[in-house]
Image: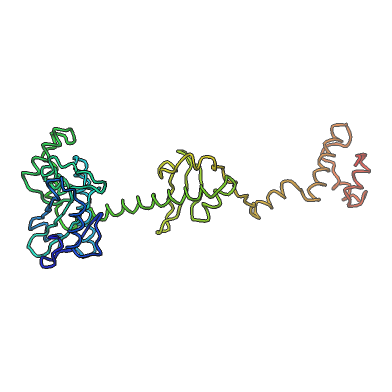
Amino acid sequence: MYGQDERKGGEVLLFQHVDMTVSPEEQAADLNAMSKPSFKVKAYNIILSFDDEDTEKIRQMEERRRYRFEREIIKAFIAEMEKRGTNITDCPFVVARHGNTDNEHFHMTVLTTTVGGEHIHDSYIKKNAIRSAAKISEDFGLRAAPKALRNEIAHQVATGERDANLKGTRRVRNRQSNTTENIQDRMRRREAVEKAERRKAMLKRNIERIARESTAANFAEKLKSEGMTLCQLPKGWGVTVTLEEDKERTYTFAQLDVDNDMVTPLLVIPPKEKKEPSNKRKVSERKRTTPSPSGSITHAVKKAGRVLNSAGGQSGGYSREDEVSKGRYEDSDEEWLRRGGHSM
């Protein structure tokens, strides 16, 4: 196929429903066989091209990042076409990059027959392609054809997608942010979002797989064995996981779109681990609940003194220490209490 012509530096960036293990000529023959004879137009060739300034910025990127950036542009273009009624995701297509000219550009060859044998909805396909290209150029900080961008902005204002008062604002901001650094920053943000979405999809699959293999008694334990801790959050049940950066992240089952019918019967509050009190706490409790023998006798002596005074016995201030100092009794608490008439 023309897009893969090696003489023009053809390099495939994206494809779907096409056997890339065979030669371009064999691919073209396969696509021709898939196309219905009754369809007047067999395929469309859509060209996405960049101006000199954007070409220079893109070609300054490191090769791996440039490759990913260009694939993102193509995917965004296809998604934008689908929003406008031209869905090519069910059609065989090949997107190739040509490097034989001064301007970076792609060739997208799209069969008009879907894999189900139906005809693609191609009404206004040219207009949709031009305006989709202008829209993604604006989103990615690239320069769009002025007329196409004006038409796209007018369309957004008419459909309520853009405030009429901001009609020219985004175009000015677009020119200011049209630098290689900002383009790469957009790519980094997109990659971070994609990585987060892949992580959430993986967690969803793993949780539902574990749920199918578990009971309420071992669901939490099986989650933990695979790096997920079951927890009850203000917004519902979920899991806490540790990421590659050693950071913990918590997701609810609703955020992960986990099947409620599958996990709800298994949700049991995990038992809390009992923590042994520290030695300091044990010592303080022992002091509070088990007084020493000397402390017990001192308490009994003071109590006995209060009882004697209230009964009109010995005068206040007359104590065991006085009796012992006069040599009347032995230095014994029990002896003094017995002689003083207090029953032990």
Image-based side of 208 in relation to 99, left or right = right
The front one of 241 and 8 is 8
Q: How far across and down, in percent of the image, does residue 200 sit? A: 39, 49
For the point 9% across and 57% down, the residue is 53
Image-based side of 154 in relation to 342, left or right = left
Q: Quadrant of residue 127 in the image?
A: top left
The front one of 285 and 145 is 145
Q: Quadrant of the C terminus?
A: top right
Image-based side of 312 in relation to 212, left or right = right
Q: How far across and down, in percent of the image, does residue 217 sit? A: 60, 47
The front one of 320 and 30 is 30
Direction left: furthest residue: 147
Q: How far across and down, in percent of the image, does residue 192 sit? A: 31, 53
Total marks shown come to 0
For the point 7% across and 62% down, the residue is 102
For the point 43% across and 48% down, the residue is 204
